[in-house]
Image: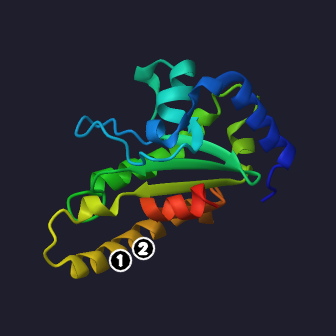
């Protein structure tokens, strides 16, 4: 499959900067929980900025009741588009299948909504762009009780690998170029500080 030219990604960056600069927010704003369970942000101490996608750009383009499930933020760097979802609550373990299905839905529907940006690109052309999906989770949410932490941490790693294998199906069919799941400290180290 042919990947679109860098000029296309540069043009997308220009259009986002021109039309949606007010939604270029710090991670504290973009990672803010909106589930009603907690009003805090997942990443509080970073001035790093990305585009606020679901509670920013799309609110300007689409009536809220018509928006599909989308990721929290998008970023463009290193000639790639990053679709980033922050999950501060528990998403791994028995009983959290719905949360994981919702994340998989966001992976796809974020691209569908991307077509609505004033880019003059079809869904097929967007699929040809170099895109990376990143899920950022909070490990602490899975270990509120300290008992058996080592065993639970080992089980969590297995569950993350299982979910990553599910998400990588989108990579195998070339919808995304790459897919990562990072614990929030790992995301700071590998993405923000890189």
Mark 1 burial class by Cα count in 10 Å: few <14, some 14-19, many 20+: some
Residue 94 vertical position relative to residue 106 in the rendered view, above or below: below
Left/right placement of residue 54 relative to residue 32 reads right
Q: Which structural element holds mark 2?
A: helix
Distance between the Cα atoms at labels 1 and 2?
5 Å
The quarter of the picture where the C terminus appears is bottom right
Q: Position of residue 39 (x, y in %)?
A: 29, 36
User: Can residue 140 be seen at all in this image of the molecule?
Assistant: yes
Left/right placement of residue 76 relative to residue 35 reads right
Q: Which structural element holds mark 1?
A: helix
Q: Quarter of the image holding residue 146? A: bottom left
Q: What residue is pinned by disc 2?
A: 161
Q: Quarter of the image holding residue 3? A: bottom right
Residue 55 vertical position relative to residue 155 in the rendered view, above or below: above
Q: Position of residue 189 (x, y in %)?
A: 54, 63
Disc on res. 75 = none
Q: Nearer the viewer, residue 193 or 139?
A: 193
Report if the CB atoms under discs 1 and 2 are less than 8 Å apart. yes
Q: Quarter of the image holding residue 184? A: bottom left
């Amino acid at each position: 499959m042919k990947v679109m030219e860098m000029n296309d990604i540069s043009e997308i960056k220009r259009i986002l900067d021109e039309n949606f600069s007010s939604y270029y927010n710090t991670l504290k704003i973009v990672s803010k929980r909106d589930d009603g369970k907690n009003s805090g942000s997942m990443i509080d101490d970073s001035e790093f900025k990305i585009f606020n996608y679901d509670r920013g750009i799309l609110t300007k383009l689409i009536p809220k009741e018509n928006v599909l499930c989308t990721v929290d933020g998008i970023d463009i760097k290193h000639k790639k588009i990053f679709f980033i979802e922050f999950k501060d609550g528990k998403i791994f373990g028995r009983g959290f299948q719905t949360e994981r299905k919702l994340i998989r839905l966001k992976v796809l529907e974020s691209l569908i909504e991307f077509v609505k940006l004033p880019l003059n690109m079809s869904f097929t052309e967007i699929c040809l762009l170099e895109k990376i999906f990143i899920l950022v989770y909070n490990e602490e949410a899975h270990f509120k009780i300290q008992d058996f932490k080592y065993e639970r941490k080992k089980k969590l790693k297995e569950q993350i690998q299982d979910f990553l294998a599910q998400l990588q199906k989108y990579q195998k069919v070339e919808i995304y170029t790459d897919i990562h799941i990072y614990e929030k400290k790992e995301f700071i180290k590998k993405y923000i500080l890189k």
